[in-house]
Image (tube, grey):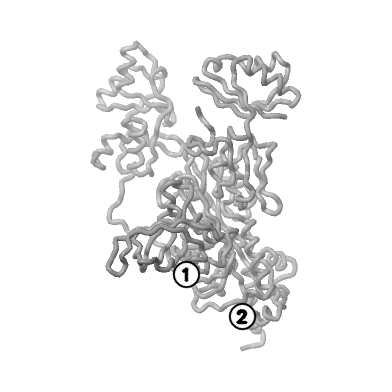
Amino acid sequence: MARILIRLNENLVPEPVVSEVILENNILVAILSAHINSKGGEIVLEVPDEGVDKIVAAFRQKGATVTVPKLIEVNSDRCFSCGSCVALCPVEAISVAEDLTIEFNKEKCVGSVCSICVDACPARAINSRFSNTENLRSSNGHREK
Amino acid sequence: MSTQNQKTRTIEEINHKILKGDAQVLTAEEMKKLVESSGVEVAFKEVDVVTTGTFGAMCSSGAILNLGHADPPIKIQRAWFNDVEVCHPGGAVDLFIGATNFCEKKPFEYGGGHVIQELVAGNEVELRATAYGTDCYPRTAVKTTITKDDLNQFYLLNFRNCYQRYNCAVNCGDETIYTYMNKLLPHMRNATYSGAGEFNPLMNDPDYETIGFGTKIFLGGGQGYIIGAGTQHSPKNLNGTLMVKGDAKTMSPEFLQGAAFTRYGTSLYVGLGIPIPILNEGLVRKTAIRDTEIFTDVIDYSVMRRDRPKLRQVSYAELKSGIITVNDKRVRVSSLSSLKMAKKVAQTLKDWIDEGQFALTSPIERLSLDTVFKPMRQTQEIPFVSNVMHPAVTCMENEEIRVIAERIVTKSVNHIVVISSDGKLLGIVTSWDITRAMAESKNVLADIETRKVITAHPDEPLENASKRMAQHNISALPVIDSERKVLGIVTSEDVSKLLGR
């Protein structure tokens, strides 16, 4: 499975873009997160590996911007396993191992579009693509355009 | 003395064994298992020392540094390490770095805790200092770089460490808040707690029988001493604290880590471990304490008061399970302090004793058992929303706009709060909304009311409510309780009457 980030501009918001892409390509996708308002939107999809190229091309043809978002990066040298991040993760991608080490499951992690854990790390051991931007640090974890 | 009372041993006897290399040392974790499997008597016979540990954010930590004199000499008035301002509490070149002071260029992100960690790690830090200049200390500015080797003294000096236990924090409000208990999502979507529970040093000797002034301890990866009860020491309700000191030059950056809490500021994570000599069977029982027996309060941090609502009591066993239930809601809970590092502290201390590198000390004075932690004496009380709010003029959603307009006139108000039949907040209508409805010939309340209402809570400082009004450019806030029931309204007029603006 691969994760892709779809950005819709305001003209595309009223269109059933996702449904069209699914029907026209006959490929099922899972919507992991979606933030849409009248000005535009961001949708994270999980797509089967063999269908990624077709899906990406189909969204681009409809005028959407498609990127493959980088996942959250954890600097294990800085992490001292406090566990502040564990209960915040909406998809339970962070867990406490038997020896009390904090473990990140990159497969489960939704990636930088979520980033809810980033500003809760006292060791500043978690980084995402947007971690240096002010709007991430001051938001509720979800980036808004 | 009867022979039955000879079930004791002394610290001298234990130290003698440590020197010979045959003292029996267990970590707190191992001790609990032994007592459970073999009982108190066996454990007393077999164990001489139990090592405990904790590793958490301890904000009231800092370090004293002596720089030595510059040429010509300077009596420092203000000084900065890596742009973090430090204080100058004493003579010319003695400085104190507090963990929570943060850098002017990287506010909230880099602070005194990080400077201490860098110095302990052997890194170079930049010093800037200014002074007014005197006949004996003529210099008015200095800029240099230093490492810990350049300092005459570099003492860690923490005036409140090692809290016996701590609160569990939740947020029942509508917005994410950032606190010293870290990020708390709205509507209790997460909880945080701190403390090592059954591994905590003071929890394993809750009567401070062996832990006191002069006890030698593991501090920040080096050796230090307890120099008294910490500030806010409150032993009666199991909130004991310690004041500690140690030579930071011998410490390790693994056990002293600078930390940043978003929108709260910086701190220092401190590793602290205490050896508990098993002098009698009572201490066996005390060191056998389990997380199921240690309780703390779940506290709602959305209430901006000194005394915040306590929602329930939870045990550390529940907290460490990762899930607690509060008001019938399952809440995922995370630790702020590191249990992994706490265990490493206890293990390292055990290794030191096993290797004969660490002997025990008898305290020269006991810690107080009855100090209370008093609130601040305030000569001026600050106003809260509940002090100025008044009953709101309300309407139901099915009322005609004409009727509402009449109510605005007869009650002489600008805001009507729209409520449900059970008194809960649905929306707000202003006289301006009504005027516009007339101009645009709209007759239905639903078309003109504002549904995303900015609100206030009765326990909120008035100042906060006032700021929120200014921020959203509005002149009134409905006051609601945690179930969104309307309690009243507070207006900018109320604020200006009381706060004079």
Residue B295 visible? The answer is no
Q: Which amino acid does label 2 sit on?
A: Ile
Q: Residue furthest top?
A: B441
Q: Which residue is drawn at 46% across and 47% down?
A: B108
Q: Residue at x 44, y 68 (%)?
A: B371
Q: Where is residue A68 in the image (x, y as percent from the top left)?
A: 64, 28
Q: Where is residue B340 in the image (x, y as percent from the top left)?
A: 64, 56
Helix, strand or loop status at disc 1: loop
Judged left or right of residue B268, residue B34 is right
Total marks in image: 2
What residue would you read off at disc 1? B152
Mark 2 crowdedness (10 Å alpha carbons): few <14, some 14-19, many ≥20: some
Which sits earlier in the primary sequence, circle 2 or circle 1? 2
Of B300 and B420, the residue lying toward us = B300
Relative to B211, residue A126 above or below: above
Q: Quadrant of residue B439?
A: top left
Q: Which residue is drawn at 36% across and 17% down?
A: B400
Q: Residue B500 carries which label?
A: none
Judged left or right of residue B221, residue B417 is left
Q: Which chain carries label 1?
A: B
What residue would you read off at disc 2? B11
Q: Which amino acid does label 1 sit on?
A: Asn
Q: In which quarter of the image is residue B360?
A: bottom right
Q: Which chain carries label 2?
A: B
The Cα–Cα distance between marks 2 and 1, rounded to whole angstroms, is 34 Å
